[in-house]
């Protein structure tokens, strides 16, 4: 039993060290050798542009639900005029960055792991290494850069669509004063709220690329290894995003 | 010249290389033969630093490649080309892009020159008008030939072949062996072929080394191996079920 415990501890410490090294080396490579612009643009298209539909859809319904729930709660205090503020602050500070990150994790994070994992098990990564080329330059850094650019932009779109989703339900369906909806929002939302949302999105982009690439790069053997890596990647990324969100919120509040 | 001395490598409790010594002469074709699962591919990956030994030394042209920094290892890897067992073509690139990739990344040649070199390399391996195809549209033999074109396109000093004919029919197999001989005669590289194609490989290789139980059992000319009195080598060449080599 002591031996098993020791072995497990060694494996955990080794994996943590390797994960940390992977992040540091990726950041180093972004500075030293960021890869070609074409590779980065391709990844922005994949992580960003192709996530647009799902982000718009999620944002619209999140905003609409916030409109409904917010109206229900605020009516109890006779403050339904504050609905715009409630919807906007919830979205900009919290739901926009987190839900955008979770949706991108499901759509692009899993695909990043699967793509790199398949390249690993079919020796394509080894082939790059035998050509004296650093695989990070081609496979990892473009995804990091693309994710860190795409997430804040997707989050901004999420926020805007969400706010109009809340407006649709609050103003058009439930009869909240349209002027009050936007006026109160303008008065309450300050630059610090927007800034904190963008900081969160940026760091979530980093987490998605980090875990997605790492899990694929060290995928196990065969189709089962890639499938396991993909599942672990989505679960771990989602958990880290939520935990990191708490710490970041406590700092940025 | 590649030299391995007292190389040990284990994966968990499984000992794969056990004090292996091997000299691979420059400019010749050396075949490494041995039963499946004996660590031939592991040996090959040590030569180019894809795997590091637990102990022992691996030297390429007098320089140790063990525990080198990535940049130093890459400098030595510039001498190598490699044809993988599963070819390892980049599956999201066309045949042309696959062969052009090393040229684009490692040279400053113009697009026209790269195009010319790629088409010539493909022609050298007997392929025409397939440059726009993707790897999954090709047969096994064609993939191997594209892999060979990619391996030779930078004119490396050393080319490693990991089971280049596995899974191919006898005619394609012979064609690939012939192709290796012809490209070797044309470019004069050092070739290391991991294979269990007996007896075909004796017509291709100038040196043959038999790997068994983590060590080189015998290393010599094809005739030395064919006339060996070692029971494991005799059993391997004859394909007999009786002898020191046990089926796992």
Image (cartoon, coloured by chain):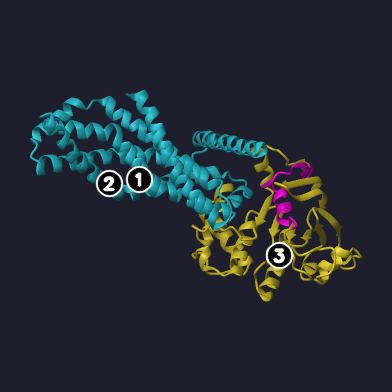
Chain colours: A cyan, B yellow
Q: What percent of the width, then of the height, locates residue B30? A: 78, 59
Residue toward you, B163 or B230: B230
Q: Crowdedness of circle 3 by 10 Å Cα count: few (<14), some, many (20+)?
A: many
Residue toward you, B168 or B189: B168
Q: What is the distance, in whole Å, between disc 2 and disc 1 at their CAs?
A: 8 Å
Disc 1 secondary structure class: helix
Say whether disc 2 or disc 1 marks the residue closer to the N-terminus: 2
Q: Crowdedness of circle 1 by 10 Å Cα count: few (<14), some, many (20+)?
A: some
Disc 3 secondary structure class: helix
* Residues at circles 2 and 1 in contact by the CB criterion of under 8 Å: yes
Residue B231 visible in the shown view: yes
Q: What is the distance, in whole Å, between disc 3 and disc 1 at their CAs?
A: 50 Å
Q: What percent of the width, then of the height, locates residue A29? A: 52, 36
* Residue ID at (58%, 37%): A12
Name of the residue lying farthest toward the right: B229
Q: Is residue B4 left or right of residue A231?
A: right
Say whether mark 1 and mark 2 are on the same chain: yes
* Residue ID at (34%, 50%): A50
Q: Is residue A230 above or below residue A206?
A: below
* Residue ID at (12%, 29%): A79
Label 1 sits on residue: A103
Label 3 sits on residue: B180
Residue A10 falls within the magenta-colored stretch: no
**For discs 3 and 2, the disc positioned in front in the rendered view:** 2
Residue toward you, A244 or B58: A244
Q: What percent of the width, then of the height, locates residue A27? A: 50, 34
* Residue ID at (74%, 42%): B54
Q: Which span of residues is magenta-colored? A: B38-62
Q: Is residue A187 above or below residue A233?
A: above
Label 2 sits on residue: A58
- Chain of the residue under the numbered disc 3 shown in the image: B
Q: Crowdedness of circle 2 by 10 Å Cα count: few (<14), some, many (20+)?
A: some
């Amino acid at each position: 039993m002591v031996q098993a415990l020791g072995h497990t501890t060694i494996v955990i410490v080794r994996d943590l060290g390797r994960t940390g090294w992977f992040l540091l080396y990726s950041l180093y490579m972004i500075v030293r050798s960021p890869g070609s612009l074409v590779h980065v643009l391709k990844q922005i298209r994949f992580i960003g542009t192709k996530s647009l539909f799902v982000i718009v859809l999620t944002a619209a319904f999140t905003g609409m639900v916030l409109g409904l729930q917010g109206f229900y709660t605020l009516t109890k205090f006779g403050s339904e005029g504050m609905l715009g503020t409630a919807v906007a602050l919830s979205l900009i500070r919290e739901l926009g960055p987190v839900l955008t990150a979770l949706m991108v994790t499901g759509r692009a994070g899993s695909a990043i792991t699967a793509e790199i994992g398949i390249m690993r098990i079919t020796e394509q990564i080894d082939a790059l290494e035998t050509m004296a080329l650093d695989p990070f330059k081609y496979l990892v850094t473009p995804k990091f850069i693309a994710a860190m650019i795409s997430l804040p932009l997707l989050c901004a779109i999420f926020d805007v669509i969400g706010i109009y989703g809340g407006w649709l339900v609050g103003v058009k369906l439930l009869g909240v004063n349209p002027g009050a909806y936007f006026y109160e929002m303008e008065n309450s939302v300050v630059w610090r709220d927007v800034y904190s949302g963008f900081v969160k999105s940026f760091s979530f982009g980093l987490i998605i690329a980090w875990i997605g690439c790492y899990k694929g790069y060290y995928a196990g053997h065969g189709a089962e290894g890639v499938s396991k890596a993909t599942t672990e990647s989505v679960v771990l990324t989602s958990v880290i995003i939520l935990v990191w969100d708490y710490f970041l919120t406590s700092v940025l509040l | 010249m590649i030299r391995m001395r007292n190389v040990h490598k284990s994966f968990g409790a499984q000992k794969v290389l056990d004090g292996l010594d091997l000299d691979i002469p420059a400019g010749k074709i050396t075949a490494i033969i041995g039963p499946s699962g004996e660590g031939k591919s592991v040996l090959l990956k040590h030569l180019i630093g894809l795997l590091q030994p637990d102990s022992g030394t691996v030297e390429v042209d007098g320089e140790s490649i063990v525990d080198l920094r990535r940049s130093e290892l890459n400098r030595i890897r510039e001498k190598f080309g490699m044809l993988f067992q599963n070819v390892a073509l980049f599956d999201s690139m066309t045949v042309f892009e696959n062969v052009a990739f090393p040229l684009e990344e490692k040279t400053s040649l113009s697009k026209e020159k790269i195009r010319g070199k790629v088409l010539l390399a493909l022609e050298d391996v007997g392929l025409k008008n397939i440059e726009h195809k993707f790897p999954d549209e090709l047969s096994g033999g064609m993939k191997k030939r594209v892999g060979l074109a990619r391996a030779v396109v930078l004119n490396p000093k050393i080319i490693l072949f990991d089971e280049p004919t596995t899974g191919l029919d006898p005619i394609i197999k012979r064609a690939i062996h012939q192709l290796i001989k012809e490209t070797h005669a044309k470019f004069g590289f050092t070739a290391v072929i991991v294979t269990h194609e007996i007896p075909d490989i004796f017509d291709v290789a100038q040196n043959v080394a038999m790997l068994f139980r983590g060590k080189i059992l015998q290393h010599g000319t094809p005739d030395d191996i064919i006339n060996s009195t070692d029971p494991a080598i005799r059993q391997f060449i004859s394909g007999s079920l009786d002898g020191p080599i046990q089926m796992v």
